[in-house]
Image (spheres, rainbow, N blue to C red):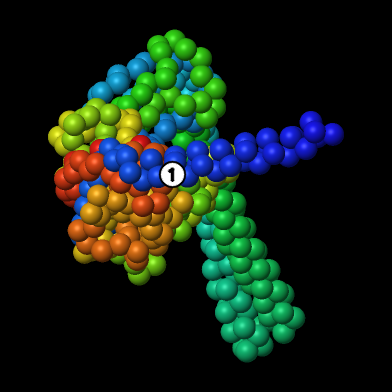
Amino acid sequence: MAASRRRPIKRWVALGVAVLFGALLVAWTRLRAVPVVVTPVVRGQAVEAVYATGSVEAADRVVVKAKTSGSIAEVFVREGSRVKKGELLARIDNPTASFDLKRGQTDLNAASAQAGKEAPQIAVLAAQARAVAADLKQATLELDRTRKLVEKGSAPASEVDRAQARVDQLQGSLEANRAQQRALRIDLSANAQRQATQVKSLAARVADTEVRAPLDGVVLAKNVELGEVVALNQPLFRVADTRVLLLEVNVDEADVARVSDGLSGKPKSEAAISLYAFAKTVFRGEVVEILPDADRQRRAFVAKIRFLSPPPELRSGMTAEVNVVTARHDAVLLAPSSAEADGSVWVAANGRVERRPIKVGIRDLLRVEVVSGLAEGESVVIEGRDQLAPASRVRVTVRPADKHDPLPDSADIAQTTLR
């Protein structure tokens, strides 16, 4: 019975000790000066950006494909060769096409001769027409003489009818001959035109064996070798005009609505570009085009960015990381990103700290825009936050505010915002 009474007493004693220990711990925490690093809240420019990756590409580029099948008879260029539009890049051997063209040209020459002024069939009909015309002239004279004889009573009236019938017959024959000539000329001309069209088609087939440059530019890739047998539509060369180079990046579909190419009335989005080939340099650019259709697999849209001051050594195929600026707020309060967590910061003043909720606007990897909750010059804790409790005493080390410039022409912001 006595033992059972002692158990509640022990529990109350243990509880009292725990409470006392907690109180002493809180008091000790408040009395102990926790070392922290603080930095002041400053005014500056906040920049919101969309991260993207891509590569440098020529604005005008073409993959040259085989328009016919056959073996490669000659190759006239290599990678890096500068070419003019229409210049011969390679020739495909296709003897059948050449033979068909020669045969077609022979048939065209024959058809043209048949349809010309000296066409034999037309000449025969013309000769027949001249003979009929001569007979018609003679018959007409005979008709005149017969009429005079009938008028004098030297011949019966039936002779006039006979002579008139002869004239009418010859006139009909002459008209039929002329109609036959016209019809024959039409047939022969149509046949010549068909042969000419056929020759053009065959010439196009032969021309397809000559692989020519589609534009002025540089041969970026050569995918064929001498003697190789190629198929129809097989890629042979890649030619591009490298005088105008653009950066093509993939913008996630969740971010593309915030990027502008200037077509909607909004200003073109600026960009900070970091090329792997120029690791210590950041270039400025602007978005000039956003393709209307998305890449279904990547769930991204291709945006084209023009360099405002491209380096002379810029080459097609260079890869890059980009921050496309989607928003910029001037003269706003800025605090380090490391000071904010869950919408609040620790503010240090007079050797103690308080936890204060804030409203945040634009964020980047280094700073956040403070919309409300802080004043300019207040010190926020950026190191030692995990050891703090409300009203804790602190031993402060002040770190100057980050003064980097967030504009895209500054290397500092690009190096800190580019992931």
Q: Position of residue 212 (x, y in %)?
A: 35, 31
Q: Is residue 112 visible?
A: no
Q: Position of residue 356 (x, y in %)?
A: 38, 58
Q: Amino acid at mark 1?
A: Val
Q: Is residue 311 left or right of residue 195?
A: left
Q: Is residue 24 left or right of residue 48?
A: right
The residue located at (51%, 19%) in the rendering is: 230
Describe the element under mark 1 as helix, strand or loop. Answer: helix
Looking at the image, is 46 positioned above or below residue 341?
A: below
Residue to which mark 1 is pinned: 26
Q: Locate the N terminus and report the quarter of the image it occupies.
A: top right
Looking at the image, is 155 positioned above or below residue 287?
A: below
Occupied quadrant, residue 36: top left
Q: Is residue 384 left or right of residue 208?
A: left
The residue located at (39%, 67%) in the rendering is: 264
Occupied quadrant, residue 207: top left
Q: Which residue ends up furthest to the top in the rendered image?
A: 227
Say which of 233 and 410 sits in front.
Answer: 410
Say which of 373 and 291 sits in front.
Answer: 373
Say which of 185 and 312 sits in front.
Answer: 312
The residue located at (32%, 40%) in the rendering is: 32
